[in-house]
Image: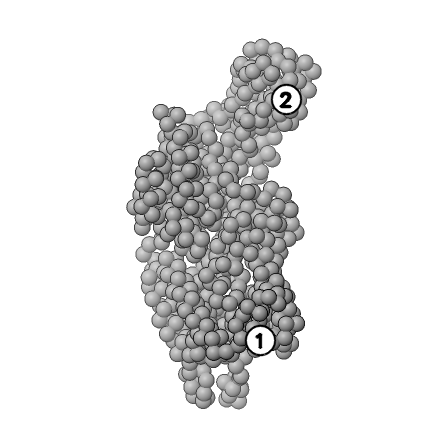
């Protein structure tokens, strides 16, 4: 045993690098039980309720729904419009006997199980006409679909019924099918995006590639990539080419791995989204420890060589290729908390597709993130613009340690929001022991034994979870905002009050930037007051399956998500871009409040 311990303590710098990574591996244990949800699988609306339309006689239509077991339709939510070239055709619905039900949202209602057979009588005969049929239903297991409108073309002369509207009639009055929301939330119908939406694989790949490029601007990623770029100032260009391609592989493999875990968890019933790993305090604290260790290395307090910033360069027996690969892994790890512009549409599309298509979108995302680095390594002009190697490189390296320290502080703040101030204080104390352990690791056997003990103490303190005194809700910290809930949202919608829903999290950098620059400013507060729009905050810092369902109902899998609900409950909500400006917000508030004036 003594020989084994002596051997362990005499390991070279490679082992020191591994010790620096131990906090992340030991502390950052994602508790998947936190993501377990009892939410069952629900059918798409078109499968839960299958509608058939036929013409019984020239002035009578039969509307017949086959309703899946465990689902039902509200009688009072059926709405029908018929229009031909002569204009609107008056209609009257005849309902069969329904079942009495006490509904949590609508109160005493009549509902249909198994089937609904309605008769529609028209006031006059019609030619080729557009039939719009709206219905709304729920599942007994706890999900309520928003009103769903289906469009048919009826040939009044022949009785032929086809899906879709006649080409001769405008589609302006047609409402698109809604997506499933949460139980008791008929007001949470899917919104129409006010930004480009990737509805095809080609556009999703393009948006993912562009979003990946933008991820390089995230403040956490900048120090890592900066040191990689500095390496281009020296050495063989052919070597740089090879390393950047390994970097690209590391980025793509990391994105695909995170996406694979996300898809697997979602298929298992978890209502999680992009950046879900940051909802675990253990993972957040582990990242803070890793960033602190990296900063200490750059500051010269501890010495791991260039291998630390390459996250494996000292492990590379093949010219540092492994180091470049793990640089890509780390870059993805720290860039994943947020959704960059264009990414939202791409990820929303990807995670509704089969796994092969979904993963191809994440490959494009990784390719976009790695593309600038690869192109830079091949650019002789860019290399010529870099100053000649010298003391400036060492000075810049030391300066780049401070963004890493700042990132560690932010991560500990997030952990405090998630798990309470006692947890944050314990993790901060653990950082002291971590720094001391890494510092003492160099030197004699005794120093190394003490160093390992200190690192063990750091891990234990990082794993401590104190009492949570608050839920970290942003809504409780900013005057004029209220906490999000499906019941409150539905109530406000019923009362004709316009609502702005901000789905955010303390670990989402883009969310925080929008709040600082746009949402939580005096100008924005005045705009909300003038428009009469209620500001509602859904804080997703910690895992919440209701918020996860809300995000998913709008075709998104990441945040920030901004949904504007007009005052008129009959108008569909719409999405705002993920990067906000004051003018974008004010235009949306004006649009939402305009319907309020019409209602009054």
In the image, is residue 404 above or below residue 175? below
Q: Quadrant of residue 70?
A: top right
Left or right: 262 with respect to 510? right
Residue, far top: 124
Q: Residue at x 62, y 67 (%)?
A: 380
- Residue 578 disc label: none
Q: How far apart in space, not on screen, are marks 2 and 1 (Cα)?
A: 68 Å
Rendered location of residue 96, percent (x, y): 54, 19
Circle 2 is placed at which residue position?
A: 168
User: Residue 191: x, y in percent?
Assistant: 49, 38
Q: Which of 55/13 is in front?
A: 13
Q: Nearer the viewer, residue 581 or 125?
A: 581
- Against 103, is 222 above or below? below
Which residue position is annotated with label 1?
234
Q: Secondary structure at mark 2?
A: loop
User: Can you see residue 355?
Assistant: no
Q: Is residue 60 left or right of residue 550?
A: right
| Front residue of this view, candidates 109 and 586 | 586
Neighbourhood count class around disc 2 (C-alpha, 10 Å): few under 14, some 14–19, many 20 upward: few
Residue situated furthest left in the rendering: 479
The quadrant where residue 494 appears: top left
> Mark 2 vs mark 1: which is more N-terminal?
2
Where is residue 180 drawn, in percent x and y? 52, 38
Q: Residue, x 36% and y 37% (percent of image)?
A: 533
Q: Does residue 155 appear left or right of residue 435 in this picture?
A: right
Seen from the viewer's position, the closer of residues 435 and 404 is 404
Q: Element type at marker 1?
A: loop
Image quadrant occupied by the C terminus: top left
């Amino acid at each position: 045993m003594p020989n084994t311990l002596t051997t362990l303590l005499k390991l070279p710098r490679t082992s020191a690098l591994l010790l620096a990574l131990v906090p992340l591996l030991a502390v950052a244990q994602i508790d998947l039980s936190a993501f377990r949800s009892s939410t069952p699988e629900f059918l798409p609306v078109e499968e839960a309720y299958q509608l058939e339309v036929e013409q019984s006689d020239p002035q009578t239509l039969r509307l017949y729904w086959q309703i899946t077991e465990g689902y039902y339709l509200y009688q009072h939510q059926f709405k029908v419009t018929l229009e031909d070239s002569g204009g609107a055709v008056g209609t009257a619905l005849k309902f069969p006997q329904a079942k009495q039900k006490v509904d949590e949202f609508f109160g005493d209602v009549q509902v249909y199980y198994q089937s609904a057979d309605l008769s529609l009588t028209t006031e006059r005969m019609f030619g080729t006409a557009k039939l719009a049929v709206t219905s709304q239903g729920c599942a007994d297991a706890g999900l309520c679909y928003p009103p769903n409108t289906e469009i048919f073309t009826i040939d009044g002369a022949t009785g032929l019924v086809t899906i879709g509207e006649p080409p001769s009639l405008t589609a302006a009055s047609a409402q698109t099918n809604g997506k499933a929301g949460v139980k008791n939330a008929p007001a949470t119908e899917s919104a129409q995006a006010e930004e480009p939406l990737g509805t095809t694989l080609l556009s999703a790949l393009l948006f993912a590639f562009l979003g990946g490029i933008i991820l390089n601007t995230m403040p956490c990623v900048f120090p890592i990539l900066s040191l990689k770029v500095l390496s281009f100032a020296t050495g063989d260009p052919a070597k740089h080419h090879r390393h950047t391609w390994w970097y690209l592989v590391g980025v793509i493999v990391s994105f695909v791995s995170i996406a694979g875990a996300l898809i697997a968890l979602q298929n298992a019933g978890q209502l999680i989204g992009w950046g879900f790993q940051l909802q675990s305090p253990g993972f957040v604290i582990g990242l803070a420890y890793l960033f602190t260790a990296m900063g200490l290395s750059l500051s010269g307090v501890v010495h791991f060589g260039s291998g630390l910033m390459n996250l494996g360069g000292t492990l590379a027996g093949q010219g540092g290729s492994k180091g470049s690969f793990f640089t890509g892994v780390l870059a993805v790890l720290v860039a994943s908390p947020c959704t960059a512009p264009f990414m939202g549409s791409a990820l929303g599309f990807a995670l509704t597709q089969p796994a092969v298509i979904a993963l191809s979108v994440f490959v494009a995302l990784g390719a976009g993130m790695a593309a600038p680095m690869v192109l830079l390594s091949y650019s002789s002009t860019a290399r010529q613009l870099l100053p000649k190697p010298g003391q400036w490189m060492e000075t810049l390296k030391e300066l780049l340690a401070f963004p890493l320290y700042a990132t560690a502080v932010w991560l500990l703040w997030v952990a405090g929001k998630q798990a309470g101030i006692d947890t944050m204080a314990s993790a901060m104390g653990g950082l002291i022991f971590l720094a001391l352990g890494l510092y003492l690791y160099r030197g004699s056997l005794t120093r190394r034994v003490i160093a390992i003990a200190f690192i063990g103490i750091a891990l234990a303190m990082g794993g401590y979870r104190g009492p949570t005194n608050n839920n970290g809700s942003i809504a409780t910290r900013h005057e004029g905002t209220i906490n999000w809930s499906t019941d409150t949202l539905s109530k406000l919608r019923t009362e004709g009050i316009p609502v702005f829903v901000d789905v955010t999290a303390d670990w989402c950098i883009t969310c925080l930037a929008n709040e600082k620059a746009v949402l939580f400013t005096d100008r924005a507060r005045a705009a909300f007051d003038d428009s009469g729009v209620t500001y509602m905050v859904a804080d997703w810092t910690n895992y919440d399956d209701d918020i996860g369902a809300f995000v998913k109902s709008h075709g998104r899998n990441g945040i920030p998500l901004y949904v504007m609900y007009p005052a008129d409950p009959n108008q569909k909500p719409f999405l705002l871009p993920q990067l906000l400006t004051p003018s974008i917000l004010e235009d949306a508030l004006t649009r939402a409040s305009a319907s309020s004036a019409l209602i009054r």
